[in-house]
Image (cartoon, rainbow, N blue to C red):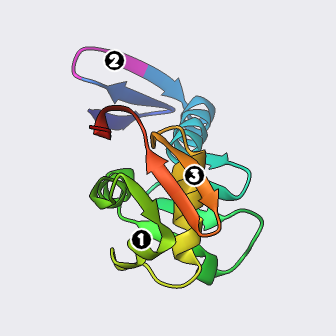
Amino acid sequence: MAVRNDGGTLVLDTGTETRELTRSEARQLRTALSDALTERREFVRTAGTYREDGAYVVERRGVESAGHRKVFESIDECRCLYDRLPEEFTADDVRHAGVTGGRRHMLVWHFVEHDAFDCELVSRQPLTARKEGPTNG
């Protein structure tokens, strides 16, 4: 993919198609792409944000503190953490994966709430979730 400035227009060449954009159209495209790359989904207790740099951030919803946030290099890294957890897991199991403090509980809740992770809440005390689907025997 290549972009070149051709006088007053920008030319976007994908290799199979060429499009000419005005500067205004190019700014609108940049904004739309940025919004798509930084999608944020809010759940009841947690939120997940896909950042422009590829990172995936899980945070406690409504709290503005780094202590209530876990930044993964990507959603795949978050998925790897989930995949390493046992079929039934608690916040203590997340601690064994290198996550400390209140982030452990936050991640258990995020796995329960986010539809990308096939698990359900088993108990609130202690906070326990169980994986469903193909991971079950």
Tell which of 117 and 90 is nearer to you: 90
Give the amino acid type for the residue marked by disc 2 in the picture.
Answer: Thr
Q: Residue at x 60, y 83 (%)?
A: 67
Asked if residue 16 is among those painted magenta in the image, a careful observer would answer yes
> Is the residue 80 above or below the residue 113 in the image?
below
| Circles 1 and 2 in contact, beta carbons < 8 Å | no
Q: Quadrant of the N terminus?
A: top left
Q: Quadrant location of the C terminus?
A: top left
Sequence-earlier tag: 1 or 2: 2
Among the 4 quarters of the image, the one containing residue 96: bottom left
Q: Pointer 2: what residue?
A: 18
Q: Which is more N-terminal, label 1 or label 3? A: 1
Cα–Cα span, label 3 and label 2: 53 Å
At label 2, counting other C-alpha atoms closer than 10 Å, the crowd grade (few under 14, some 14-19, many 20 or more) is few
Q: Disc 1 and disc 2: Cα gap in Å?
A: 48 Å
Please state which of the two labelled residues, at mark 3 or mark 2, is closer to the viewer.
3
Q: Residue furthest top?
A: 17
Q: Tell me the kind of residue under disc 3.
A: Val
Q: Which residue is mark 1?
A: 94
Residue that carries the numbered disc 3 in the rendered image:
122
